[in-house]
Amino acid sequence: MTETIELPRIVRFWVDTQICIDQRRCVLEAPALLRDRKEKGGPLIVSDRPVTHAQTLEVLNAAWVCPVAAFKVELEDGSVRDSNDRTVRELGKAYSRKTPA
């Protein structure tokens, strides 16, 4: 039996290019929504709104692995979260132990 992780609804996400250090760890975590690019300034965002459960998990994990909290996630309640946020860290850890359906 696969455990379903309860997720917050993500309105949109973005990368703060002023603090991004271009490690591209987020690209590895959210390949459906992000692409690598050669220029500095963060990843190329293909879509800033996850549609599926799996994409939502990818976005949260991408935020979690960002070492400088440049990856920002806006939730339905208007709050903005990043890797400094406890909820994002906990969901990222949970996702890293599970294979999304």
Image: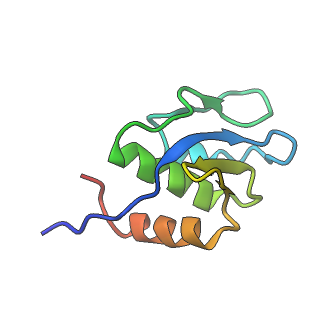
- Which image quarter is the N terminus in? bottom left
Q: From the top left corner, tell me how far across and down residue 74 is, in percent.
A: 62, 48
As displayed, is residue 26 above or below residue 88? Answer: above
Look at the picture and state if 99 lies above or below 52.
Answer: below
- State the residue lying farthest toward the left: 1
Q: Residue furthest front?
A: 77
Residue located farthest toward the right when viewing the structure as drawn: 18
Q: Nearer the viewer, residue 37 or 71?
A: 71
Q: Is residue 98 left or right of residue 26?
A: left
Q: Is residue 29 visible?
A: no
Residue drawn where x is 42% and y is 65% of the image: 96
Q: How many marks?
A: 0
Position in image of residue 73 (x %, y %): 62, 49
> In front: 40, or 77?
77
Residue 31: tell me if it is visible: yes
Residue visible at 85% across and 48% down in the picture: 19
Residue 93 in the image: state x and y as whole percent.
Answer: 48, 71
Q: Is residue 17 above or below residue 19?
A: above
Residue 9 rendering spot, x and y as whole percentages: 46, 50
- 12 on left or right of 53: right
For the point 41% across and 59% down, which residue is it? 7
Residue at x 72% of width, y 61% of height: 67
| Scheme of image coloration | rainbow
